[in-house]
Amino acid sequence: MSTMPDYDPETGEIIEGTKPNLGEQSVTEISHALKRTLEDRFGHVRVRGEISGYRGPHSSGHAYFALKDDGAKLDAVIWRGVFNKLRSKLQEGLEVIATGKITSYPGKSNYQIVIENVETAGVGALMALLEERKKALAAEGLFDQDRKKPLPYLPRTIGIITSPTGAVIRDILHRLNDRFPRHVIVWPVRVQGETAAAEVAAAIHGFNAMEHKPDLLIVARGGGSLEDLWPFNEEIVVRAAASSAIPLISAIGHETDTTLIDFASDFRAPTPTAAAERAVPVRADLLAELASLNARQKRTMGRVIGDAKTRLHSAARALPKPDEILATARQRLDVAASKLPKALKANVQVHAVLLARSSGKLSIKPMAQRVSEQRRRLKDQKDRLKRAMTQTTTRKSDQLKSELKLFGALGYQSVLKRGYAVIRDQHGKPLQKIAGVKPPTTLEIEMQDGRLDVIATPKKSQASLF
């Protein structure tokens, strides 16, 4: 049995002779013993507290933070596999209920909770988180009115993002068919649960990436609790709605339900049915209005034509008759016609006198002199041209003879006349060196008076053709 040692009250040292007889343990052994004690004593616990020191997941994927209340603080860790499956999004200051195991971390001599699940601590916490997120997104300008696009009056194609089952899609399609049937493309998504937000955001991006895009998008879901509608408060969904190039109508829940996608959409419908009503007009109303406009147009055109006829008749009565307008012109024409023969005769007589005067001034002798002068000038030009051609021909002939002499002097035939010869191979190519000739082979020799074929043979003393 071990005994406790006695201590000196003044110095605090162990009095000799009273040292304990306890067995020694290492730090690791003590730490592991404490760890087992904590885990055996507490096991699984549910802890309510406020998230503190949260900075997002570590590079390893694990998350480290603390849970605190007014009186204490508890370190917490969430392993990567659990963190990726959490339904609730962690955020600094959020009050949560964490379920996990109490254990210790020997490396720091502290205890902690290894969280396996996290739930928000009531609607109040969710509303606080929602309000904080709304302020942050609004500060970025995602909810500004000048970002909102006008909705098309009569879209050709409507894209609907909702659950493929349930009353929502049936209500929308039924109301569209009642009002104005349109081509509809349904992108099925989950509207509740862990993957709902990512699926809705992917559907919005998917419609915008189509080659033939819809003219209008509707994101719809039926009513539910705040937790059920939470995917439409996620940042990924809000940003996708704000960045959509296609006009978007949000129709989430009932009229009293409000989600963040409502602020980012181009139009917020209180219900999915109201979204369908806003998307298209009533076809029967359009036909009735068109018929009314046609009737008004006919009545207006009738009045316009009637007024024009009245003004035309009034103007016609004020105009003189055609015979009266032409009477003066006819009379002037008759007077001019009666004067025309006399005027023509007088004109001919005047021109005859002028012609006689001009012909008297003409003389044959000056004309003959001009012709003779032209002939003489023509003969002189012909003689000069002939002399120029003779000189040019003589000069070109002398130049050609000189070039022929030069060509003959430079040609190889003149070299042959001096006693040389040209040797060609069997292909007719002139040879310049013995190298490359492989005897016996046939060669051609050209001399001054002709050509002959020879056979090249090797020579023992040195390389030679003969």
Image: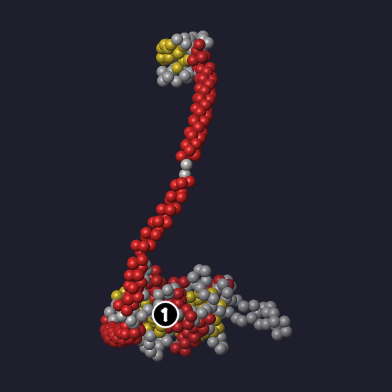
Depth order, front residue of 273/355: 355
x, y percent for residue 262: 42, 83
Query: For the point 50% across and 32% down, which residue is it?
Result: 376
x, y percent for residue 378: 49, 33
Residue 440, visible in the rendered structure: no
Name the amino acid, label 1.
Pro
Q: Is residue 10 left or right of residue 302?
A: right
Query: For the point 45% across and 10% down, which residue is it?
Result: 449
Q: Indicate the colouring scheme.
A: secondary structure
Q: In this view, does 87 lie above or below 342?
A: below
Q: In this view, does 439 lie above or below 100?
A: above
Depth order, front residue of 99/262: 262
Depth order, front residue of 198/368: 368
Within 10 angstroms of label 1, few (less than 14), some, or many (20 or more) residues?
few
x, y percent for residue 455: 42, 11
Q: Is mark 1 on a helix, strand or loop?
A: loop
x, y percent for residue 399: 53, 23
Depth order, front residue of 426/159: 426
Residue 323, visible in the rendered structure: yes
Q: Which residue is under mark 1?
A: 150
* Residue 158 image-quadrant placement: bottom left
Query: For the point 37% across and 83% down, which residue is it?
Result: 251
